Amino acid sequence: MKTQCPNCKARFSTSEASVGKQAKCPKCAKPFAIQPFIETPPAEKPPVTSPKPAETKVQKAEPAAPASKIAKPKAVPHKGPEPVKSKATKIAEPLKTLAKIKELVKQEKGLSKTVFVYYWTAARVIAGILGGLGLIMAIKNQAHLILFMTFAAADIFLLCSVLIELLMFYRMWVAIADEEVSITPARAVEFLFIPVFNIYWALCMLTGFVEDYNAFIQRHSIKAKDLPFVLFFIYAFAFVLAAMLVVIPMVCVVVSVGLVWRAFVGYPEVFWALLFFAFAAGLAHFITYILVAIKTCDAINALPEIKTPEL
């Protein structure tokens, strides 16, 4: 029979008669009561398997958005009644709009040859062709109505060319508008509509621009060519003659057609003389304007950006 020391767990053999007797362990020398040792079979251990890691999707944490990009909550629009605008506010709004337009015109200092040379030339050529054809057809067919209709059609293109020419006068004075200029841009155009005085003003304004421009580039030390005084002086006379003999008679078509027709019927010599002077004045104005417009566009476009006072 086998027994086991309860102290040191040492196993050894003994007889069955010594069961319950005291004995000393031969290994640890401690006394103990002899009992039969029953050996229990070892329990079956389950196979050890390495645990599989849980298949969980780890989402990468996105970096936090900067404070500047965080959307701010939209303000809830106020649904109450709209405030009633006072009369002073209603009057001030169009004045602010006009001030903005004035500022935009002031900032655009360059002159486009496409507008002030090519468009003007096309408008004047079409107006001249319509007026000439109408005059020829009216004389040939002895028809007073044809002359009236063709002059009225030519007036549309003639007025377009006049507006382009006046715009050039305004823009060229805007380009040199500083504290030393003698004429303001608005006054340069407005005084041309004063009867009789506009004859003097056209000569003064156009020749004055040459003097002020040449003084302007010297005052600001700008490397640019001086404008020719003689060319602008001739153009000023041609502008006045063309206005009196061509533009005004054609624009006042209702009155001028009757006078032209009566002169043609009763006084053919006077009619042909007036027609010759009108054609000469128109041609002189046509040629000198193109030269002046080219010179003016080149001169204004050569100016650098210079701060100028309010108009």
Image (cartoon, rainbow, N blue to C red):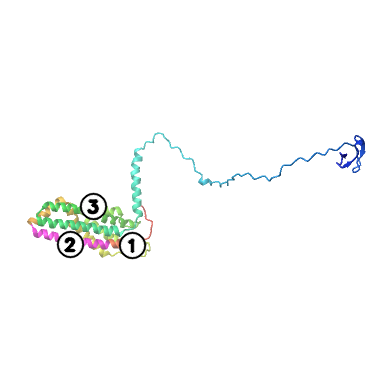
* Of callouts 2 and 3, the N-terminal one: 3
- Classify mark 1: residues with Cα within 10 Å, few (<14), some (14-19) or many (20+): some
Give the alpha-carbon distance from disc 1 to disc 2, as whole Å.
Answer: 34 Å
- Classify mark 3: residues with Cα within 10 Å, few (<14), some (14-19) or many (20+): few
Q: Is residue 64 magenta?
A: no
* Of callouts 1 and 2, the N-terminal one: 1
Query: Which residues are drawn in magenta?
Result: 267-292
Q: Quadrant of the N terminus?
A: top right
Q: Quadrant of residue 12?
A: top right
Main SS category, magenta section: helix
Q: Could you tell whether 170 is left or right of 67 in the image?
A: left
Q: Could you tell whether 61 is left or right of 166 in the image?
A: right
Q: Quadrant of residue 81?
A: top left
Give 209 or 274, whichever is nearer the viewer: 274
- Rendering coords of residue 117 (x, y %): 27, 60
- Residue at label 2? 280
Report if residue 112 is visible in the image.
yes
Give the alpha-carbon distance from disc 2 to disc 3, as whole Å.
Answer: 24 Å
Report if residue 176 is visible in the image.
no
* Of callouts 1 and 3, the N-terminal one: 3
Camera-side mark, 1 or 2: 2
Q: Residue at x 14, y 56 (%)?
A: 135
- Rendering coords of residue 300 (x, y %): 33, 60
* Element type at mark 2: helix
Q: Identity of the amino acid at label 2?
A: Ala
Give 210 or 244, whichever is nearer the viewer: 244
Q: Could you tell whether 31 is left or right of 51 in the image?
A: right
The circle drawn on residue 106 is none
- Rendering coords of residue 185 (x, y %): 30, 54
